[in-house]
Amino acid sequence: MNSMPLPYTRILTWCDRRPLCAEAIARRLLAATPAASPDYPWALFTLGWCLMIREKLEEAFVTLERAQAALERASLELGVLRARHGLLLVGLLRGLSSDALPAWEELATAYDQRSMPLQAARVRIGQIRCLNILWRPTEALSMLAPIQATIDELGNDQDRALLSQRNPTRFAALPDNPNFIHRRDNRDFSRNPDDLRIPKRLPNGIYVETNHSANSIVRRIGQPLDVFNIERSEFAIYLREDRDAKLGGIGMR
């Protein structure tokens, strides 16, 4: 069968909400599935996807590669495309270069050729993310409108939230956002470096103020997360151990 069997679809549905539980179930299901079973490629893919969501990237990469090979042997064409998508996402999380961009477009085109516009749009959301990471927001912006139309028509709330987070127009509007303009017209972002004490250039002609203490940076970090609809619970700050603190204490210097 070219479509994913229901048990694996359900695990992937749980994966975003309860990734630890989904991974445990996927491992048990794979262990219980004989290698000769027609479901075995799907069991491999499901575990690989759960591992990618959990950011166990080395194991995810190996498992998704095995899944892709198994799906190819079984002539499960759509499964192969999904495994390719998973591998691209693993590459994105591991760090990427511009060499990865053609593979994203090839995968999106493969979905277009099979009249699967929603799947193609989901792949292109990843492509926009790549362009933003590579400091190429103008190219990302040029892709936005057709993807937005497809997601608005066919996507779900999660698709809309992901696209909203990748929207480069929000980034370009940071200097005009009143939340980043303080007393005496002190600004966190500006298009003019002379407005800032110690400016740092960002993409698209925007500068950010860097003249802040560590504590001030921690306090301010939540505002950009809110602008891009990123849950604060998804963001973690790791503090190095303070040499002056008691044994086992953690502080920020």
Image: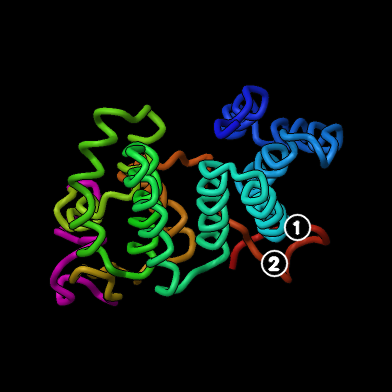
Identify which residue, 156 or 17, lies in the foreground.
156
Numbered disc 1: secondary structure: loop
Residue 237 vs 121, above or below: the answer is below
Numbered badge on residue 249? 1
Quarter of the rendering occupied by the N terminus? top right
CB within 8 Å, label 1 to label 2: yes
Give the quadrant of residue 11: top right
Q: Indicate the position of residue 49 as horizontal and vertical percent values.
A: 62, 44
Quarter of the rendering occupied by the C terminus? bottom right
Q: Indicate the position of residue 74 as horizontal and vertical percent values.
A: 66, 44
| Residue 106 shown left or right of residue 235 in the figure | left
Q: What is the crowding at mark 2: few (fewer than 14 residues within 10 Å), some, or many (at least 20)? A: some
Residue 91 vs 52, above or below: the answer is below
Identify which residue, 195 or 141, lies in the foreground.
141
Is 49 one of the magenta-colored residues? no
Q: What is the crowding at mark 1: few (fewer than 14 residues within 10 Å), some, or many (at least 20)? A: few
Q: Residue at x 57, y 28 (%)?
A: 13
Q: What range of the chain is rendered magenta? A: 178-199
Is 183 one of the magenta-colored residues? yes
Q: Residue at x 22, y 54 (%)?
A: 143
Residue 253 vs 157, above or below: the answer is below
| Residue 25 shown left or right of residue 53 in the figure | right
Q: Which amino acid, mark 2?
A: Asp
Numbered disc 2: secondary structure: loop
Real-space Cα separation, disc 1 to disc 2, in angstroms? 7 Å
Numbered badge on residue 160? none
Q: Which amino acid, mark 1?
A: Gly
Identify which residue, 221 or 16, lies in the foreground.
16
Q: State the residue position of label 2.
A: 242
Q: Residue at x 82, y 39 (%)?
A: 36
Residue 149 vs 66, above or below: the answer is above
Q: Indicate the position of residue 198 as horizontal and vertical percent values.
A: 29, 77
